[in-house]
Image (tube, grey):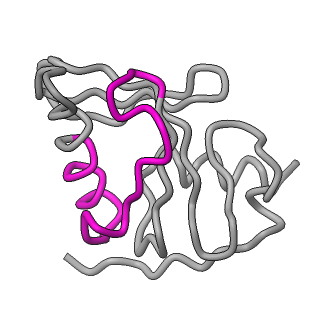
Amino acid sequence: MKTKKVTKNTDTVSKKPSGFCYWEDDVLVLNVLGTPSAKRDAIGKAKGNQLKISVTAAPVAGKATDHMVAFLAKEFGVKTSDIEVVFGRMNINKQLRIHAPQKLPAVIEKFVQKKAKA
């Protein structure tokens, strides 16, 4: 599958926290509301200033967060080491920093386009 290179435009996603994601140079900062022990791994809709993300892993000793990082690495086309958990490793409220994402999931792409029109 061919992936489209992400070109970051600071006009489309504000550097100031507005919504569930924003850019800091080539790093996408993502605020997450996690759901462990779900039926499937999935990126959901925005809920306030967080993006809902469900994972199948149980919330035991941070394993759900580790599973989420591995799932998101595939979705963003990066290595797991390119995703930093800023806070919330043992909590459903998390902030992630994704270094140089190569592609954006549909819900984030839609958010970026909406911000560009505003």
Name the quadrant containing residue 31. Answer: top right
Residue drawn at 28 percent across, 27 percent down:
54
Q: 99 above or below 19? A: below
The image shows residue 18 at horizontal and vertical percentages of 78, 41
Out of 4 and 33, give the one closest to the viewer.
Answer: 33
Q: 57 above or below 75? A: above
Decide if residue 1 is on the left or right side of residue 35: left
Q: Which residues are magenta?
A: 68-93
Decide if residue 37 is on the left or right side of residue 73: left
Q: 92 above or below 8? A: above
Q: Residue furthest front?
A: 61
The image shows residue 93 at horizontal and vertical percentages of 47, 25
**Is 90 a magenta residue?**
yes
Q: 61 above or below 28? A: above
Residue drawn at 30 percent across, 20 percent down:
35
The image shows residue 30 at horizontal and vertical percentages of 54, 46
Residue drawn at 60 percent across, 79 percent down:
7
Residue drawn at 32 percent across, 26 percent down:
90
The image shows residue 63 at horizontal and vertical percentages of 15, 34
Q: How many marks?
A: 0
Name the quadrant containing residue 39. Answer: top left
**Is 48 a magenta residue?**
no
Out of 86 and 82, give the one closest to the viewer.
Answer: 86
